[in-house]
Amino acid sequence: MLEFLRKWRRARKLAALTVPLATWGRVEAGLPFLDYLDADERARLRELARGFLVDKQFHGAQGIVLGDEILLAIALQACLPILNIGLDAYRGWVGVVVYPGDFIIPRHEMDEAGIVHEYDDEVLGEAWEGGPVLVSWHDESEAPAGVNVVIHEFAHKLDMENGDVDGLPLLPPGMSRAAWAKAFNDAYRRFCDQVDAGEETVLDPYASESPGEFFAVASEAFFETPCVMEHAFPAVYQQLRGFYRIDPAAGERRFREESHHNAPAERSGFDSPGGAPPR
Ligand SMILES: [Zn+2]
């Protein structure tokens, strides 16, 4: 399609997509970490979320009906990591598949002896390179504690921009791959030791699965519990701040001062000792 025609159609779709203020308010109230954004950032996030809804195709799996509030909640969370990066980071694919809760992905894996093993993997989400993002949707009451499936899967998408899910995304100019690798490798090694020793951890133990999972789980915490993340992993926090070009811990402190709370609520550790399912 001619480029100008494509842009014109997109602009028309975007203009037609109106969201009542009350609806924004209801959806955002369910995402308390958005309070760490200032007024300008919140307005820009809404605009990005509208663009995301126009650009992507949503599919409800297993009978889930995707109402406006589910779509908006997913779009807002998907766009939070790219608030200062831009929607272009999600180019090249269109599908977002939403499941009602955990879902099963049948796997086939060949072992070293060449024998194929088939098994069912129960997951919270998955991102496919060049393909759709799969996420589970949980009602607030039954959402696994300390887990943000949407931010997690979209962090994987950003990681895939330069190939493998290896915890090393495409860094902006001025950031050092060596500094990134050192901060993440040190933290990952330390974290895996803690998990192996059965110690209580600030991040979901699932982060010890691989450097790619560590990056995605750290990204969830970076946006959801930024002060805790900054305190527990200062070097990783600093790298994530450079990558996402935002400082949510500063926003959290500002929010807590404004709301006359004394100190950030420290999360003592991940709530579920076994960790949440794969994602
Ligand atoms: Zn993952």
Image (tube, rainbow, N blue to C red):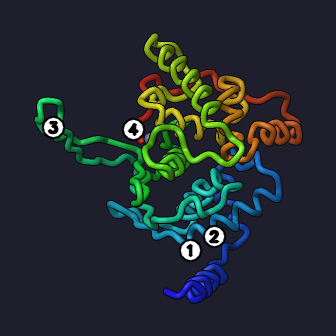
Name the mark nearer the viewer: 3 or 4. Answer: 3
- Name which of mark 2 and mark 4 comes first in the sequence: 2
Q: Residue at x 45, y 65 (%)?
A: 93
Q: At x 53% / y 39%, what residue is drawn?
A: 168
What residue is shown with label 2?
50
Q: Is mark 3 within 8 Å of ligand 1?
A: no
- Amino acid type, residue under disc 1 in the picture: Val
Give the spatial CA distance, label 2 vs label 4. 29 Å
Which SS class for mark 4?
loop
Q: How far apart, in angstroms, are the residues tagged by discs 3 and 1?
A: 40 Å
Q: Are marks 1 and 2 in contact (CB under 8 Å)?
A: yes
Residue type indicated by callout 3 = His
Q: Is residue 163 above or below residue 1?
A: above
Tag 1 or tag 3, which sits nearer the N-term? 1
Look at 48% across and 19% down and name the residue there.
192
Label 2 Cα crowd, 10 Å radius (few <14 / some 14-19 / many 20+): many
Q: Is residue 139 visible?
A: no
Q: Are marks 3 and 1 in contact (CB under 8 Å)?
A: no
Image quadrant in which you'd find residue 148: top right
Residue 278's disc number = 4
**Label 1 neighbour load within 10 Å: few <14, some 14-19, many 20+:** some
User: Which residue is under mark 1?
Assistant: 54
Q: Nearer the viewer, residue 132 or 130?
A: 130
Q: Amino acid at mark 2?
A: Arg
